Amino acid sequence: MIPHDDVLRDRMRRHLAEHTLLEADHEGHKRAAVAIVVVPSEPGADPYDPGAFSAEEMTVVPGDITGLTGAMTDVSGGAAFLLCRRAAKLNSHGGQWALPGGRMDPGETPEDTARRELHEELGLDLPESAVLGRLDDYVTRSGYIMTPVVLWAGGDVVLHPDPAEVAHVYRIGCHHLQRDDSPRFITIPESDRPVVQVPLGGDLIHAPTGAVLVQFRWVALDGEIGRRVHEFEQPVFAWK
Protein backbone atom coordinates (compact mmCIF):
# COMPACT_ATOMS: atom_id res chain seq x y z
CA MET A 1 0.00 0.00 0.00
CA ILE A 2 0.98 3.62 -0.53
CA PRO A 3 0.68 5.89 2.54
CA HIS A 4 -1.75 8.77 2.20
CA ASP A 5 0.59 11.47 3.50
CA ASP A 6 2.22 14.77 2.70
CA VAL A 7 5.15 13.01 1.03
CA LEU A 8 2.86 11.46 -1.58
CA ARG A 9 0.91 14.68 -2.10
CA ASP A 10 4.05 16.75 -2.65
CA ARG A 11 5.61 14.12 -4.93
CA MET A 12 2.53 13.96 -7.15
CA ARG A 13 2.29 17.76 -7.30
CA ARG A 14 5.94 17.94 -8.39
CA HIS A 15 5.56 15.21 -11.03
CA LEU A 16 2.47 16.85 -12.51
CA ALA A 17 4.20 20.25 -12.63
CA GLU A 18 7.12 18.70 -14.52
CA HIS A 19 4.85 17.05 -17.08
CA THR A 20 4.27 18.97 -20.33
CA LEU A 21 0.56 18.64 -21.13
CA LEU A 22 -0.73 17.30 -24.42
CA GLU A 23 -3.79 19.43 -25.13
CA ALA A 24 -6.34 18.49 -27.77
CA ASP A 25 -8.27 20.87 -30.02
CA HIS A 26 -10.71 18.87 -32.13
CA GLU A 27 -13.32 21.02 -33.84
CA GLY A 28 -16.84 19.98 -32.98
CA HIS A 29 -15.91 18.06 -29.83
CA LYS A 30 -17.45 18.97 -26.48
CA ARG A 31 -15.27 19.71 -23.46
CA ALA A 32 -15.41 17.70 -20.24
CA ALA A 33 -13.31 17.20 -17.12
CA VAL A 34 -12.89 14.29 -14.74
CA ALA A 35 -11.50 14.19 -11.22
CA ILE A 36 -8.88 11.78 -9.95
CA VAL A 37 -9.34 12.32 -6.22
CA VAL A 38 -6.71 10.84 -3.90
CA VAL A 39 -8.30 9.95 -0.56
CA PRO A 40 -7.40 7.83 2.49
CA SER A 41 -8.85 4.32 2.70
CA GLU A 42 -8.85 1.39 5.10
CA PRO A 43 -7.79 -2.13 4.11
CA GLY A 44 -10.63 -4.64 4.16
CA ALA A 45 -13.36 -1.99 4.06
CA ASP A 46 -14.89 -3.39 0.85
CA PRO A 47 -15.63 -7.13 1.24
CA TYR A 48 -18.84 -6.87 -0.80
CA ASP A 49 -19.71 -5.14 -4.08
CA PRO A 50 -23.41 -4.21 -4.27
CA GLY A 51 -23.13 -3.40 -7.96
CA ALA A 52 -21.12 -6.34 -9.30
CA PHE A 53 -21.61 -7.17 -12.98
CA SER A 54 -23.31 -10.45 -13.84
CA ALA A 55 -21.63 -13.19 -15.89
CA GLU A 56 -23.85 -12.18 -18.83
CA GLU A 57 -22.82 -8.54 -18.55
CA MET A 58 -19.16 -9.55 -18.52
CA THR A 59 -19.50 -11.17 -21.96
CA VAL A 60 -19.23 -7.74 -23.66
CA VAL A 61 -15.68 -7.33 -22.32
CA PRO A 62 -13.16 -8.00 -25.11
CA GLY A 63 -10.20 -10.31 -24.60
CA ASP A 64 -9.52 -12.91 -21.92
CA ILE A 65 -11.87 -12.58 -18.95
CA THR A 66 -10.88 -15.84 -17.28
CA GLY A 67 -11.18 -15.54 -13.50
CA LEU A 68 -12.91 -12.16 -13.60
CA THR A 69 -16.07 -11.91 -11.49
CA GLY A 70 -17.21 -8.38 -12.30
CA ALA A 71 -16.97 -7.46 -8.61
CA MET A 72 -14.82 -4.66 -7.18
CA THR A 73 -13.84 -6.02 -3.75
CA ASP A 74 -10.74 -6.04 -1.53
CA VAL A 75 -9.21 -3.08 -3.35
CA SER A 76 -9.18 -0.44 -0.59
CA GLY A 77 -6.19 0.44 1.56
CA GLY A 78 -3.80 3.38 1.88
CA ALA A 79 -3.88 6.22 -0.61
CA ALA A 80 -6.80 5.53 -2.93
CA PHE A 81 -8.70 7.13 -5.80
CA LEU A 82 -12.46 7.35 -6.21
CA LEU A 83 -14.03 5.26 -8.97
CA CYS A 84 -17.75 5.28 -9.74
CA ARG A 85 -20.07 2.73 -11.26
CA ARG A 86 -22.52 4.87 -13.20
CA ALA A 87 -26.22 4.52 -12.54
CA ALA A 88 -27.72 1.94 -14.89
CA LYS A 89 -30.59 4.23 -15.94
CA LEU A 90 -28.33 6.94 -17.37
CA ASN A 91 -28.81 7.48 -21.10
CA SER A 92 -25.07 7.59 -21.76
CA HIS A 93 -22.74 4.76 -20.62
CA GLY A 94 -25.10 3.58 -17.88
CA GLY A 95 -23.57 0.96 -15.60
CA GLN A 96 -20.02 1.59 -16.82
CA TRP A 97 -16.96 2.57 -14.79
CA ALA A 98 -16.18 6.26 -14.64
CA LEU A 99 -14.26 8.89 -12.72
CA PRO A 100 -16.36 11.71 -11.24
CA GLY A 101 -16.81 14.38 -13.87
CA GLY A 102 -18.89 15.79 -16.66
CA ARG A 103 -19.32 18.41 -19.33
CA MET A 104 -17.75 21.82 -18.79
CA ASP A 105 -20.12 24.75 -18.37
CA PRO A 106 -19.41 28.04 -20.21
CA GLY A 107 -16.66 30.02 -18.50
CA GLU A 108 -15.39 27.07 -16.46
CA THR A 109 -11.85 25.77 -16.32
CA PRO A 110 -11.30 22.00 -16.10
CA GLU A 111 -10.47 22.49 -12.43
CA ASP A 112 -13.78 24.30 -11.88
CA THR A 113 -15.70 21.51 -13.59
CA ALA A 114 -13.94 18.74 -11.69
CA ARG A 115 -14.68 20.36 -8.35
CA ARG A 116 -18.30 21.13 -9.27
CA GLU A 117 -18.95 17.61 -10.50
CA LEU A 118 -17.41 16.18 -7.33
CA HIS A 119 -19.93 18.14 -5.32
CA GLU A 120 -22.88 17.23 -7.56
CA GLU A 121 -22.09 13.52 -7.94
CA LEU A 122 -20.49 12.62 -4.62
CA GLY A 123 -21.32 15.47 -2.25
CA LEU A 124 -17.61 16.21 -1.81
CA ASP A 125 -16.54 19.86 -1.59
CA LEU A 126 -12.85 20.54 -2.14
CA PRO A 127 -11.14 23.96 -2.25
CA GLU A 128 -9.04 25.24 -5.14
CA SER A 129 -5.94 24.39 -3.10
CA ALA A 130 -6.83 20.69 -3.38
CA VAL A 131 -5.87 20.70 -7.08
CA LEU A 132 -2.48 19.06 -7.68
CA GLY A 133 -2.39 19.38 -11.45
CA ARG A 134 -3.68 18.07 -14.77
CA LEU A 135 -2.98 15.15 -17.07
CA ASP A 136 -3.21 15.04 -20.88
CA ASP A 137 -6.48 15.54 -22.71
CA TYR A 138 -8.07 12.34 -23.99
CA VAL A 139 -10.34 12.47 -27.05
CA THR A 140 -13.22 10.03 -26.72
CA ARG A 141 -15.10 8.16 -29.43
CA SER A 142 -18.33 9.76 -28.19
CA GLY A 143 -17.16 13.24 -29.16
CA TYR A 144 -15.61 14.67 -25.99
CA ILE A 145 -12.24 16.11 -25.10
CA MET A 146 -11.73 14.90 -21.54
CA THR A 147 -9.30 16.75 -19.26
CA PRO A 148 -8.24 14.84 -16.10
CA VAL A 149 -7.66 16.89 -12.95
CA VAL A 150 -5.81 15.38 -9.97
CA LEU A 151 -7.01 16.49 -6.52
CA TRP A 152 -6.04 15.71 -2.94
CA ALA A 153 -8.56 15.06 -0.16
CA GLY A 154 -7.34 14.62 3.39
CA GLY A 155 -8.92 13.92 6.74
CA ASP A 156 -12.27 12.19 7.12
CA VAL A 157 -13.65 12.08 3.59
CA VAL A 158 -17.42 11.52 3.71
CA LEU A 159 -19.19 10.81 0.42
CA HIS A 160 -22.86 11.22 -0.46
CA PRO A 161 -23.33 9.79 -3.98
CA ASP A 162 -26.23 11.07 -6.04
CA PRO A 163 -28.22 7.90 -6.90
CA ALA A 164 -29.44 9.49 -10.13
CA GLU A 165 -25.86 9.48 -11.44
CA VAL A 166 -23.84 7.06 -9.31
CA ALA A 167 -24.80 3.48 -8.47
CA HIS A 168 -21.82 3.04 -6.13
CA VAL A 169 -18.47 4.70 -5.41
CA TYR A 170 -15.31 2.74 -4.60
CA ARG A 171 -12.02 3.63 -2.95
CA ILE A 172 -9.32 1.87 -4.98
CA GLY A 173 -5.86 1.69 -3.45
CA CYS A 174 -3.43 3.44 -5.79
CA HIS A 175 -1.01 0.54 -5.45
CA HIS A 176 -3.40 -1.61 -7.50
CA LEU A 177 -2.55 0.53 -10.51
CA GLN A 178 1.06 -0.62 -10.12
CA ARG A 179 0.35 -4.34 -10.50
CA ASP A 180 2.84 -6.25 -12.65
CA ASP A 181 0.05 -7.25 -15.05
CA SER A 182 -1.17 -3.68 -15.52
CA PRO A 183 -1.82 -2.24 -17.98
CA ARG A 184 -2.55 -4.90 -20.55
CA PHE A 185 -3.50 -4.52 -24.21
CA ILE A 186 -5.58 -6.33 -26.79
CA THR A 187 -6.33 -5.79 -30.47
CA ILE A 188 -9.76 -5.49 -32.07
CA PRO A 189 -10.68 -5.68 -35.76
CA GLU A 190 -12.45 -2.31 -35.61
CA SER A 191 -9.29 -0.29 -34.90
CA ASP A 192 -5.52 -0.24 -35.47
CA ARG A 193 -4.98 1.25 -32.02
CA PRO A 194 -4.38 -0.98 -28.97
CA VAL A 195 -7.28 -1.33 -26.53
CA VAL A 196 -6.00 -0.67 -23.01
CA GLN A 197 -7.26 -2.69 -20.04
CA VAL A 198 -6.51 -1.95 -16.38
CA PRO A 199 -7.11 -4.96 -14.08
CA LEU A 200 -8.75 -3.88 -10.82
CA GLY A 201 -10.47 -6.24 -8.42
CA GLY A 202 -12.46 -8.72 -10.47
CA ASP A 203 -12.90 -6.49 -13.50
CA LEU A 204 -11.10 -4.58 -16.25
CA ILE A 205 -11.24 -0.80 -16.66
CA HIS A 206 -11.13 0.41 -20.26
CA ALA A 207 -10.50 3.76 -21.92
CA PRO A 208 -11.26 6.53 -21.54
CA THR A 209 -11.15 5.95 -17.76
CA GLY A 210 -8.53 3.22 -18.10
CA ALA A 211 -6.24 5.41 -20.23
CA VAL A 212 -6.49 8.27 -17.74
CA LEU A 213 -5.66 5.93 -14.84
CA VAL A 214 -2.62 4.54 -16.66
CA GLN A 215 -1.21 8.02 -17.16
CA PHE A 216 -2.00 8.89 -13.55
CA ARG A 217 0.10 5.92 -12.51
CA TRP A 218 2.95 6.58 -14.90
CA VAL A 219 3.26 10.35 -14.39
CA ALA A 220 1.83 11.24 -10.96
CA LEU A 221 2.77 8.10 -9.03
CA ASP A 222 5.82 6.71 -10.83
CA GLY A 223 7.31 9.99 -12.05
CA GLU A 224 7.61 8.82 -15.67
CA ILE A 225 7.27 12.33 -16.98
CA GLY A 226 6.08 12.67 -20.56
CA ARG A 227 4.54 9.21 -21.05
CA ARG A 228 1.44 9.45 -23.23
CA VAL A 229 -1.80 7.50 -23.52
CA HIS A 230 -3.69 9.39 -26.22
CA GLU A 231 -3.30 6.53 -28.73
CA PHE A 232 -4.95 3.98 -26.43
CA GLU A 233 -8.24 2.76 -27.88
CA GLN A 234 -11.64 2.28 -26.26
CA PRO A 235 -13.60 -0.98 -26.58
CA VAL A 236 -16.44 -0.85 -29.09
CA PHE A 237 -19.11 -0.91 -26.36
CA ALA A 238 -17.82 2.49 -25.18
CA TRP A 239 -17.80 4.17 -28.60
CA LYS A 240 -21.35 5.59 -28.40
Image (spheres, rainbow, N blue to C red):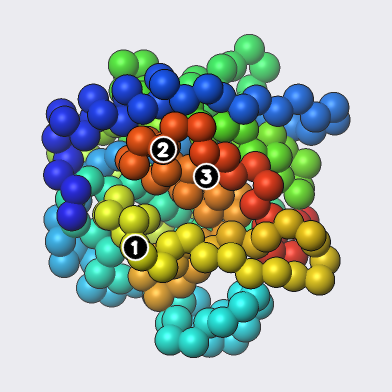
Q: Nearer the viewer, residue 106 or 202?
A: 202
Q: Are marks 2 and 1 in contact (CB under 8 Å)?
A: no
Above/below status of 15 relative to 87: above
Q: Nearer the viewer, mark 2 or mark 1?
A: 2
Which quarter of the rendered picture does the C terminus lie within?
bottom right
Q: Secondary structure at mark 2?
A: loop
Q: Secondary structure at mark 3?
A: helix
**Three-letter code, disc 1:** Arg
Q: Position of residue 104 (x, y in %)?
A: 63, 26
Which label sits on residue 179? 1
Give the distance between the C-alpha atoms of the residues marked 1 and 3, in whole angstroms: 16 Å
Q: Earlier in the sequence, mark 1 or mark 3?
A: 1
Q: Nearer the viewer, residue 171 or 184?
A: 184
Q: Position of residue 234 (x, y in %)?
A: 68, 57
Q: Mark 2 sits on what residue? A: 224
- Horizontal placement of 218 versus 239: left or right? left
The answer to which quarter of the image holds residue 197 is: bottom right
Q: Earlier in the sequence, mark 2 or mark 3?
A: 3
Q: Is residue 90 visible?
A: no
